[in-house]
Amino acid sequence: MSVKELLTPKQVANAIGASESSLKRWCDQGKLRTVRTAGGHRRIPISAVLEFLKVSGQQLLQPELLGLPPSLGRTERGLDSASDSLREGLIGNNELVCRRIVFDLYLAGHSIAEICDRVIQPSFVEIGNLWDCGIIEVYQERGACEITQRVISELRTTWSYTEPDAPMAMGGTLSGDEYRLPTAMVELTLRSAGWCATSLGTSLPVESLCIAIERNRPLLFWLSVSHIEDPNQFIASYPPLFEMASKVGTAVVLGGRALSESIRNNLQFSTYCDNFRQLERFAQTLRDAADRKNKRVAEAETGSGSFAIDAAKSTSTNAS
């Protein structure tokens, strides 16, 4: 069963064991964010439901009605112990357990950035070590990647709806870098922070990414770098991307285990992030700065309009 993106008040009421009238009252009070369909019907994004559960402490009695894992929200988990449990679930090919662990952590109040940094990444570091030592098989490592990709995709569905004025972000990996999970986790982190973020995929030519930046003009562009075949070629091919981003006012964020300090010293970028929490903080700073700029522009335009109206009135009065 997959997560439902938009829900009716009745579906949410049944899932949390509340009356439909109570749920509609919470919506009217602004405690539950809603959207309207083309026909004018009220719907509740699943992200709003999860946020409401985190803030209100309301229990989710029948999560399966929302397409969420059974028993969700009934297990107390710490981040450190969750990393061990997730690793065991991934190696054991237990997708249901893995889904429940990640969703439980979010409902417990942990941010997506925290979950990526302290649970998902450490799990894969250990899985990689076990694979290198021959303790687990290749199929188990690959299976763990596939499960995690599906869980991340499911979480992304949770934030499939973004506000109309949400800032845009996009990114991916360059040619030769086939690692999907890091760029997917960047997308998820930014979406959970209120951005309209889109991962363009993996192994993309610089020229194509430049076109994407020029056409879409995102506020933020990320480049996830988990593998570099030829460092010299990477350094030589990168500059057009930063030049295009600078031209259209896009901030470039770099990250990834393959970006050594010696490589970074030969690149231009807006910031480098070691982890997802750093990314989240930078994105918030960038968004705040953009909001202040837009506010100043709007105030200036309003002031100019008022001046023009006053001038017109003055001219009219003098003429009479």
Image (spheres, grey):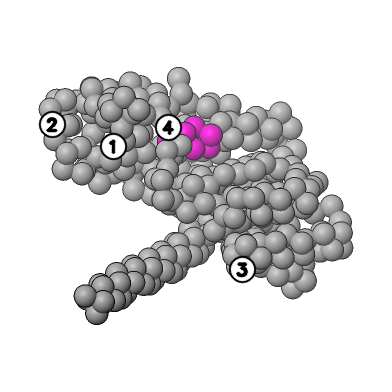
Ranked by sequence position, the earlier of labels 1 and 3 is 1
Residue kind at label 4, given as amino acid type: Arg
Which secondary structure class fits the magenta region best? helix
Which residue is under mark 2?
22
Task: Report the span colored magenta.
Answer: 152-158
Query: Can you say which quadrant of the picture contains the N terminus?
Result: top left
Ranked by sequence position, the earlier of labels 4 and 1 is 1
**Crowd around label 2: few <14 · some 14–19 · many ≥20 (10 Å):** few
Residue 157 colored in magenta in the image = yes
- The structure residue drawn at horizontal position 14% and vertical position 35%, both measured from the top left corner, is 25
Residue kind at label 1, given as amino acid type: Thr
Q: Secondary structure at mark 4?
A: helix
- The structure residue drawn at horizontal position 35% and vertical position 34%, both measured from the top left corner, is 45
Closer-to-camera residue (172/179): 172
Look at the numbered discs 2 and 4 and tell me whether their residues touch, using CB distance below 8 Å.
no
Ranked by sequence position, the earlier of labels 3 and 4 is 4
Compute the Cα span from label 1 to label 2. 15 Å
Asked whether the viewer can see residue 226, the reply is no
Q: Is residue 317 above or below residue 71?
A: below
Which residue is under mark 1?
34
Asked whether the viewer can see residue 178, the reply is yes
Compute the Cα span from label 1 to label 3. 35 Å
Compute the Cα span from label 3 to label 4. 36 Å
Ranked by sequence position, the earlier of labels 2 and 4 is 2
Q: Secondary structure at mark 2?
A: helix
